Amino acid sequence: MLGQKVWLITGTSSGFGRRLTGLALARGDRVIATARTLSKIEHFPKHPNLRLMQLDVNASTKEIKARIDHAARVWNGIDVLVNNAGYGLPALLEEGGASLMLRQFQTNFFGVVNVCNAVLPYMRKERNGTVVVIGSRSAWKPERVRGLGNHDVLASEMINHSLIFFPGFYAASKAAVHAMSESLATELEPFNIRVLLVKPGAFRTEGILGHPWDCSNPIPDYDEQRDPDKAMEIVVDVVKGEGCAAGREWPLYLVLGKDAEADIRSKCAKVLKHLDDWNDDVRGVDVV
């Protein structure tokens, strides 16, 4: 994708969103950085290619459309949408119940749907665009884990393993986002709009539950394993077809991190083993 692009990124106050903002600007692109609370991003350095905008993905469909319409008028369109805003609600499924599940899905799933549907008319008009969805390895490993296992984790969970996270609500919302993204990719292909589903493991970013990463005792050996800047640099490469993505076929999936790779391979192996162990029953229901 050559030329200057216009990015709209949700959830830029911290984590991957904040890093993507800086990296896209560094590549010469324009960025509309959004956050639920504008004051959380007003400290961003001034830049001629940067615009800040309040956007709450939990708002009504009508309000989200109005905000996106406003954003599209800034530079006459949106070329790249990054659905990054999201959070996790740790709880047991039975204890949290449907009300907690609805809260989790409102942000992580319906928020993504509403923002996508507001942006897509502009991309379809141009018959070009990219939709990036920040997913999670939790969709592949929804069992009880130590640490959140997504793109924003608590330092205490990652470093001290002092907390156990029950990711049922979060994992369910991300699994829904993954399935939606795969369907969306098929629906948008005729319009030359591409979808990139990013599946990150655990990275050294600000805590998704509001806690900063503890860097009081940095160990260099871990830097490469959990460097969010390096991860987002790859995302920008893929979107623009540069760097590590130059000359390579478009990937619907972008898995980032050895831990994410291990979890995905483990789940695939588990499902394949089931098909082998129960093959006679799997095929036994077919009418010959």
Image (cartoon, helix red, strand yellow):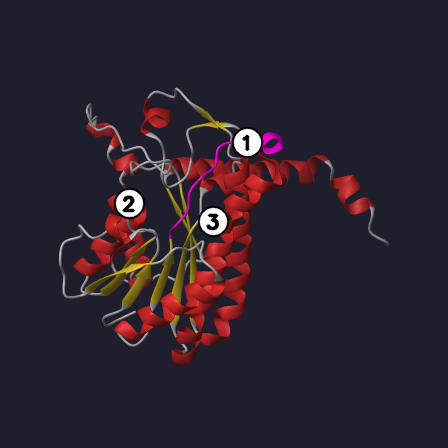
Residue located 55% across and 36% down the image: 168
Q: Which mark is residue 14?
A: 2
Q: Is residue 94 magenta?
A: yes
Tell which of 38 and 167 is nearer to you. Answer: 38
Which residue carries the number 3 mark?
108
Which of label 1 and label 3 is nearer to you? Answer: 3
The circle drawn on residue 143 is 1
**Mark in the foreground, 2 or 1:** 2
Question: Which residue corresponds to the image point at 13% horizontal and 58% vertical from the top-left?
Answer: 46
Identify the secondary structure beneath mark 2.
loop
> Is 262 on the left or on the right of 75, as rendered?
right
Q: Give the Cα separation between the discs numbered 3 and 2.
A: 16 Å
Identify the mark nearer the N-term, 2 or 1.
Answer: 2
Residue 86, position in %: x, y? 41, 47
Task: Kindly identify the amino acid type of the residue bearing the numbered disc 2.
Answer: Ser
The reply, left or right, for residue 272 in relation to residue 131 is right
Which quadrant does the N terminus fall into? bottom left
The secondary element bearing badge 3 is classed as helix
**Vertical comparison of 101 with 250: above or below:** above
Counting from the top left corner in percent of width and height, residue 211 is at 31, 32
Rendered image: mark on residue 116: none
Q: Position of residue 18 (x, y in %)?
A: 26, 49
Q: Amino acid at mark 1?
A: Glu
Residue 89 lies in the magenta stretch: yes
What distance separates the C-alpha of mark 2 from that of mark 1? 27 Å
The range drawn in magenta is 84-95
Q: Position of residue 282 (x, y in %)?
A: 76, 43
Quarter of the image where one finds residue 256: top left
**Distance CA(mark 1)–CA(mark 3):** 19 Å
Quick one: which residue is furthest to the bottom in this view?
Answer: 125
Evaluate if marks 3 and 2 touch, with contact meaning CB atoms under 8 Å apart: no
